Amino acid sequence: MAEKTLSPEDVFVALQNGATKRTRDSLEIIHTICKEQVEAGRRDFSVATIGRLSSDREGPGAQAIRNTTGAHYRALLDAWASQVNGAGRKPSRKSETGVADEVLNMIPDAYVRALVGCVFAENRQLKKENTVLKMNSKVVIDRRQLAEPGRSQSAAGLQVFPPLTCLLPLEIEALRYATSEEFLRSMGWTIDPKNGRVSSKGGLVVFRVGFATAIKKVLDAVEQ
């Protein structure tokens, strides 16, 4: 027997359960907009379109829906698109189907499909960051104690950076907030004290092993 696909209303109710008031209000805005799209005979449930309409009503914009934390919004859009055979994204000028798209197309459940899509997006972002790091592999970290903080020039003409002096106060504060109890509680995330992995309430890995411990080491070094 084929698995029954959840209706947009079922997905909406499930997403509302356990969410914060702010998230529930945002889901309500998006859900209402999607209903209006159907009633008007439109089948465009893309992030760009719904995000623009939602932003006009002080709801989450397109970027907020695209972010990793916007998986629940995308799940709701997918449910509506599947219900009326609509479009969950704007058609690209040149359609290229990759392995990730093929895998997503094989997942019938809209909510699971959105979460897996987030994992693929995070993987692509990590690859981009790795490429940037390789391009800057000639940067040398000087671990010697210098008389004055700041940049120094070695005898060979190679630019050397003292450890952690390149971090601005606001960047240090951003790292501290990323692992604070206040932020984690607002997102419904938890940190595994053994390996530093950050997970969501449903067990989805938000940041891989070593994330929280790495930030702690940086902050400890800065505060010395």
Image (spheres, grey):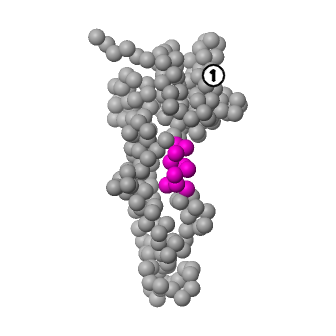
Tell which of 55 and 6 is nearer to you. Answer: 6
The stretch drawn in magenta includes residue 184: yes
Q: Can you see residue 130?
A: no
Compared to 72, does 130 lie above or below? below
The stretch drawn in magenta includes residue 117: no
Whole-percent x, y for residue 222 in the image: 51, 71
Whole-percent x, y for residue 42 in the image: 60, 16
Tally the numbered discs: 1
Q: Is residue 15 left or right of residue 205?
A: right
Q: Amino acid at mark 1?
A: Ile
Location of residue 32 (image quadrant):
top right
Whole-percent x, y for residue 60 in the image: 62, 35
Residue at far left of view:
1
Location of residue 186 (image quadrant):
top right
Assign the N terminus to one quadrant of the image.
top left
Q: Residue at x 55, y 68 (%)?
A: 167
Secondary element at image label 1: helix
- Which secondary structure is most common in the magenta stretch? helix
Which residue has dot 1 on it? 33
Whole-percent x, y for residue 2 in the image: 31, 13
**Magenta part of the chain:** 177-187
Q: Residue at x 39, y 23 (%)?
A: 109
Tell which of 100 and 210 is nearer to you. Answer: 210
Q: Can you see residue 56?
A: yes
Mark 1 surroundings within 10 Å by alpha-carbon count, few (fewer than 14), some (14 through 19), many (20 or more): some
Tell which of 37 and 215 is nearer to you. Answer: 215
